[in-house]
Image (cartoon, grey):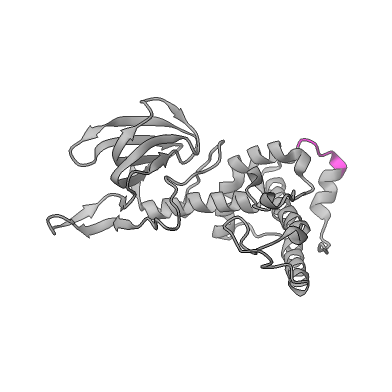
């Protein structure tokens, strides 16, 4: 089973299991699959991944429910959360902050790690490589951020608001993306949906002209601002977000017949027939 064929949906967004500063550089201390036991040296099959995450807050990854809290001889204190088809186990936790049956949402602190974290994932009873699962979660987070959802784009600390054509529909867009973004990304990966020609042409045009005007790397790049944009580049960020959101809405219209509720029939027709590249 490969996570590229599976979808994780979440009404509250997505979160990685823990956060750490660059100085901490959390490493995998024991990988998935056939491994050598660190104490005995014996070969065994490791059902999860161990992270050298000492005494860190542990978070829920998405909207879900706690389906297990307890202690066993292998993983000591543990919690299990269920997110749709997926079950995620945190083992060797120092302290759990949730109880059985409790609903959780992305970013809720559910536990504190002990000396390390054992992280295990299954889907409908079949185990998955946890690193592939986390790659999917991180990909969902990055795509939402790239589209400007939840205001994660870090031009805010410059006192600049990145504006798009969809600001008035942001709440509805957020709900649509949390519901359908995994399907959109999966269809792109599988080649069953391709972004529009208009989007590709417009992106090339925007980035070519922006490079010629030296918009890039005016500030130190950050995770949320990898091109190092300053306030001069705010319109660029808004245009890129317009294109990304527009292609997602194009996918929704073509594949699912879903439009923003604020759109009338004329807007729907014009949206689907627009093909002219966008200039900056």
Q: Where are the magenta residues, as a range?
A: 261-266
Residue at screen point 33% across, 46% down: 119
Tell me: residue 206, above or below residue 104: below
- Name, please, the residue furthest toward the right: 266
- Counting from the top left corner in percent of width and height, residue 239 is at 76, 57
**In the displayed structure image, the side of residue 21 where residue 221 appears, left or right:** right
Q: Is residue 124 visible?
A: no
Number of numbered discs visible in the structure rendering: 0
> Of all residues shown, which one is farthest toward the bottom?
212
Residue beneath the point at 46% across and 41% down: 61
The residue sitting at 24% across, 41% down in the picture is 75
Residue 115 horizontal side relative to residue 149, left or right: left
Frontmost residue, 5 versus 91: 91
Q: Is residue 130 left or right of residue 229?
A: left
- Residue 96: x and y in percent read 34, 32
Q: Is residue 198 above or below residue 267?
A: below
Give the position of the C terminus as an image quadrant: bottom right
The quarter of the picture where residue 261 lies is top right
Q: Position of residue 214 (x, y in %)?
A: 74, 71
Q: Is residue 237 magenta?
A: no
């Amino acid at each position: 089973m490969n996570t590229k064929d599976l979808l994780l949906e979440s009404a509250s967004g997505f979160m990685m299991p823990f956060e750490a500063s660059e100085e901490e550089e959390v490493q995998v201390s024991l990988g998935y699959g056939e491994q050598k036991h660190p104490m005995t040296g014996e070969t065994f099959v490791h059902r999860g991944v161990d992270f050298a995450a000492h005494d860190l807050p542990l978070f829920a990854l998405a909207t879900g429910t706690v389906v297990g809290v307890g202690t066993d001889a292998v993983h000591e204190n543990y919690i299990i959360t269920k997110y749709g088809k997926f079950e995620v186990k945190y083992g060797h936790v120092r302290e759990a902050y949730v109880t059985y049956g409790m609903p959780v949402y992305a970013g809720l602190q559910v536990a504190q790690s002990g000396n390390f974290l054992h992280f295990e994932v299954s889907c409908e009873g079949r185990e998955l490589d946890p690193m592939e699962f986390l790659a999917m979660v991180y990909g969902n987070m990055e795509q939402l951020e790239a589209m400007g959802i939840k205001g994660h784009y870090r031009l805010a600390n410059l006192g600049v608001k990145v504006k798009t054509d969809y600001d008035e529909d942001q709440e509805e867009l957020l709900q649509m993306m949390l519901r359908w973004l995994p399907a959109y990304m999966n269809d792109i990966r599988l080649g069953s949906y391709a972004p529009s020609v208009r989007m590709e042409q417009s992106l090339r045009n925007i980035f070519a002209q922006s490079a010629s005007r030296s918009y890039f790397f005016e500030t130190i790049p950050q995770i949320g601002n990898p091109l190092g944009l300053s306030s001069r580049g705010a319109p660029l960020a808004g245009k890129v977000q317009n294109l990304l959101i527009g292609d997602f809405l194009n996918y929704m219209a073509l594949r699912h017949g879903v439009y923003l509720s604020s759109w009338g029939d004329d807007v729907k027709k014009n949206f689907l027939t627009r093909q002219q590249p966008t200039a900056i």
